[in-house]
Amino acid sequence: MNKTTRIDRANAIRALAMDAVELAQSGHPGAPMGLADFAEVFWREYLNINPTNPAWVNRDRVVLSNGHASMLLYAVMHLAGYEISIDDIKKFRQLHSKTPGHPEFGMTPGIETTTGPLGQGFANAVGMAIAERQLAQTFNTSTHTIVDHRTWVIVGDGCLMEGISHETASLAGTLQLNKLVAIYDNNGISIDGETSGWFTEDVVARFQSYGWRVLPRVNGHDPEAIQRALDTVTCDSCAQPTLIDLKTTIGYGAPTKAGTAATHGAALGSEEVQATRENLDWLEEPFRVPPEIAEDWNLSTRGSALEAAWNDQFAQYAEANPRLAAEFRRRMNGQLPEEFDTTLNQYLQSLSQTSKTVATRKASGACLDVIGPLLPELIGGSADLTGSNNTEWQGAGKLMNGGRYINFGVREFAMTAIANGLALHGGFIPYTGTFLVFMEYARNAVRLAALMELQHIFVYTHDSVGLGEDGPTHQPVEQLTNLRTTPNFSVWRPCDGVETLCAWRFALRRTSGPTALVLTRQNTVQQNRTNDQIENIERGGYILKLESETLQLILLATGSEVSVAFEASYELERSGIGTRVVSIPSTDQFLVQDQAYREQVIPSEIRTRIAIEAAHPDYWRKFVGLDGRVIGIDRFGVSAPGDIALNYLGIHAQAIIDAAQELLGDTVSSNHADTR
């Protein structure tokens, strides 16, 4: 028999939420107070987790998409037995605390993803649900089910107003992700007040049209109604994702502010807090939870038993299926197969012996034909640009048929955030593809991948005005600078097939953050290299052409402009100018090399430097200095065939020669024809 009542346990959440926000004088008490009754039923009776081991692989995943309600998670997790103390609750929103203003992945035990930008947690949850289903299809057998968990996501009105929720819900319905459950905190309030003035769509009908099952108008303050809804979700075998339309009162229990925007994003105020205590019959001092309530709330024993039972099941599974069990451990531990290096080294050697010109997007596709069969954890797709991005390898198979290729449709933002969810779940290395310029549609999810240090590989093709006739709307200019200045983000712009494979290999080894592969539509020249040069590619920058005379000029280039730098260098050498060509496929990786190596490649005493890239020039000032030159593009593009567009916008050898002449004076002469 329970020692305490449901309302007692729910009020513990409300009290901790309003106390923490009041002490911080910052935060959002309303949603945690409104969701407390649901949370008490959900966490204590339906959720399969282990607070003593938040990383248990078969745990249910819980995402709070409306991350401003973070005190809901912190209060529940403290009560449930996670390593979140009352002192941590008191430090809500303070420097270096475990309880930041919005949930931060990696900072707080049990937080599955960073949320706050509304709607993205919803998309992350879809990625997690895809991951669960794929792992279950791969590893479960007729006698052993070792992957069997649900993904739950709490969303608010703001999440469902954001466009990403439409993209995400549409795809989730099509994919029939039946172990995905969204709980819609339908309180009708956002920052500006009652949403009836700007959010009047029929959410139930909307989700039904996406192919979801909807449980409408569930009373979020009636535990029995909540139980019936959760029983429906967990006890049947519906083939659809489910939305629970949970009707709640924001700030429930606050006598004058409940149901208003005043509880959304600010402390209630000392008088209202005291009045709420009296209204809820919660007479405890701030931050004090009575021992009997704390004891009833603690889920550590239950969680440990759940994991222990799973461990016993996995031991039986491993005995019956040793190879499958070993593969499951490898993938969940994020280890690459033993044959990874050998296979890629062999392919690299074969690539280095060819002189075939190829667009780096096609070189990337060829790399995937090798990598895809080698890495069963590789999963990804394109935002309706498969043939242009070259992102589907032979034999990948469609996701709907149990394969690993996802046709995301024209949904760049959802695609990126869903793939973040795949990375967060574990067991997968996700990649996504679109044109570089359309990275802008997904920009905030790209940023969150870097913030969470996720292994997510971005395949961005059509990397410059060289894509041609589609014109300025499709021609990227500023995007490379945008990505390169994002913390913890690695950007690679390879110049040919060899550098493309090295970029893929780097990205697959890098587990501390996302990597972008920025690839051409137009053909590039395959460069000749020594083995030493090949080994240095993954250092981000290396000497590709050594000067034949005394070094006077350094040309720095990436991508398709490397061959342009080569063309200019030959003319400059004929004029007696010792010219070095440095390929820098990854500026961020070059900049983290030791000083001795960087000095070897770009000697500090040689200040005459020119950088060449068909993108915004400002980023390259750190390499060439204020006295150097950058051959780049600081305007939007033009609609014309690619070679004509590049020529018109000044990306050609003569522009380099002219810049060198300006820097070095009359020592430069050239018979090079002006092709502008």
Image (tube, helix red, strand yellow):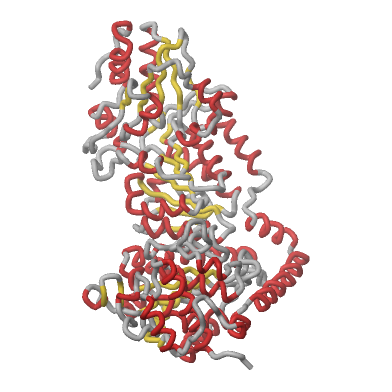
- Residue 188 is left or right of residue 326, and the answer is left
Q: Please identify the quarter of the rendering in which residue 534 is found.
A: top right
Q: Position of residue 180 (x, y in %)?
A: 48, 72
Quadrant of the drawing holding the N terminus: bottom right
Q: Position of residue 188 (x, y in %)?
A: 31, 78
- Give the total of numbered labels: 0
Residue for point 58% across, 90% down: 4
Q: Is residue 438 above or below residue 303?
A: above
Quadrant of the drawing holding the C terminus: top left
Outermost residue, right side: 319
Q: Can the viewer see residue 454 in this picture?
A: yes
Residue for point 39% across, 13% down: 570
* In front of the other: 238 or 254: 254
Q: Position of residue 197 (x, y in %)?
A: 21, 75
Outermost residue, bottom side: 1
* In front of the other: 378 or 248: 248
Q: Please identify the quarter of the rendering in which residue 666 is found.
A: top left
Q: Can the viewer see residue 401 in this picture?
A: no
Q: Is residue 352 above or below residue 191?
A: above
* In front of the other: 664 or 287: 287
- Residue 216 is left or right of residue 198, and the answer is right
Q: Position of residue 415 (x, y in %)?
A: 41, 57
Q: Please identify the quarter of the rendering in which residue 53 is found.
A: bottom right
* In front of the other: 395 or 180: 180
Residue for point 44% across, 73% down: 154
